[in-house]
Image (cartoon, helix red, strand yellow):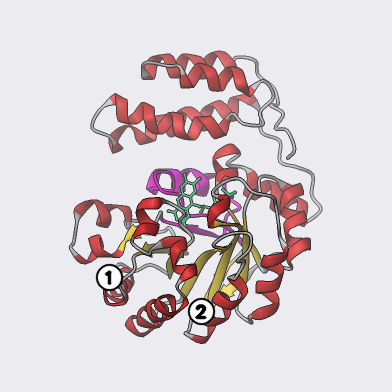
Amino acid sequence: MSLGYRIRDVAVEPGLALAPMEGVTDLTFRRLIRSIGGCGLVHTEFIPARNLKLSIRQALDLAMFDADEHPIAIQIYGNDPEVMAEGARIVSDLGADILDLNMGCPSKKVCQRSGGSALMKEPDLSRRIVAAMRAATPLPFTVKMRAGWDPDHRNAPEIARMCEEEGAEGLAVHWRTRTDLYGGVRELDTIRRVKASVSIPVIANGDIVDAVSALQTLEATGADGLMIGRGAMRDPWVFRQIQAALHGRPPVVVDALERKRVLLGYLEAIRPNFRDDRGVLGRFKKIARHFTDGVEGGARLRDGILHSQSLEEAVESVEAFFAEPGEVAVRAS
Ligand SMILES: Cc1cc2nc3c(=O)[nH]c(=O)nc-3n(C[C@H](O)[C@H](O)[C@H](O)COP(=O)(O)O)c2cc1C
């Protein structure tokens, strides 16, 4: 089976997207995913529209992408329709393929200002934001949301219809509600109801970490595509694994040397992004925590890396763990 969808004229093939992740999906991480392959669309992390409007360097840096990094979606957030419209215009000027609105962020800081998932509690404000962004740019436009605010208010289908009415051209839906944060009981029916409520592509998101969880999610939701976040840190080959399963091909075999090469290559690549080793080590730990999850004996590697006081120690842990050549088993979900 081949999986693909179109956000108006932007073909996402395969229909597997890298989710936006703050402090993760920067240029370096997206390059890593691209070098491995199998991913049809990447997202930047969420960028405050206000900071884009104010030309704040950090926000503009987050919106940077490689000349051959297409298709790419730039995600923005905020709660003021006019500022969001300005953000949309800037994203369009930057040459992104898709403009994406964040309606899913659960963080207090963002929600307190009615941004992110708090928008799901404020349908009128959400409508004004979507409409203002739509009017501001001809760019293909998507919205990423959660299933609702809490398990008693899974209103994603209504919000989805509103987004479609106001001109959104694709929706990514994370099965969790705001109050689930990153826990909660897996519930895919709301995504299925969103799919039944709109005629634009619906992309399912949440806990897709391998071929098994990908196929289950597709079957339960009928979604047009899948979006993967933490699963891509856990196993950057996950996109290729899912593709292999969709096409009935055997799983991709990744040996210890290749895993080591990718992990240490990432460490080298992030060095210039930080002022000092502390910053590099912090970011490396963030990714490595997930990279070691599910790997046979990965707890040992994770502990080694997380307890490292220096980059040298972290590298030593990686070298020691992957010293034995051969295949490294990644547990199924
Ligand atoms: C570290 C981290 C940062 C995230 N940052 C964003 C973000 O900037 N924008 C957004 O829409 N979602 C963000 N998310 C949510 C993910 O895009 C995704 O919806 C969520 O992690 C569920 O998918 P997963 O189970 O595949 O990780 C973030 C998640 C994580 C773990």
Q: Position of residue 241 (x, y in %)?
A: 69, 46
Q: Check disc 1 and report its element: helix, strand or loop.
A: helix
| Residue 97 appearing in the image | yes
Q: Amino acid at mark 2?
A: Cys
Q: Nearer the viewer, residue 78 or 67?
A: 78
Q: Position of residue 264 (x, y in %)?
A: 47, 27
Q: Nearer the viewer, residue 249 or 172?
A: 172
Q: Position of residue 260 (x, y in %)?
A: 55, 26
Residue at 49% from the left image edge and 68% from the top image edge = 120
187 shown above or below 237: below
Residue 127 magenta-highlighted: no
Residue 27 magenta-highlighted: yes
- Which residue position is annotated with label 2? 163
Q: Position of residue 238 (x, y in %)?
A: 64, 45
Residue closest to the far right: 248
Q: Quadrant of the N terminus?
A: bottom right
Disc 1 vs disc 2: which is toward the camera? 2
Q: Which residues are magenta?
A: 16-44
| Residue 66 appearing in the image | no
- Which residue position is annotated with label 1? 90
Q: Amino acid at mark 1?
A: Ile
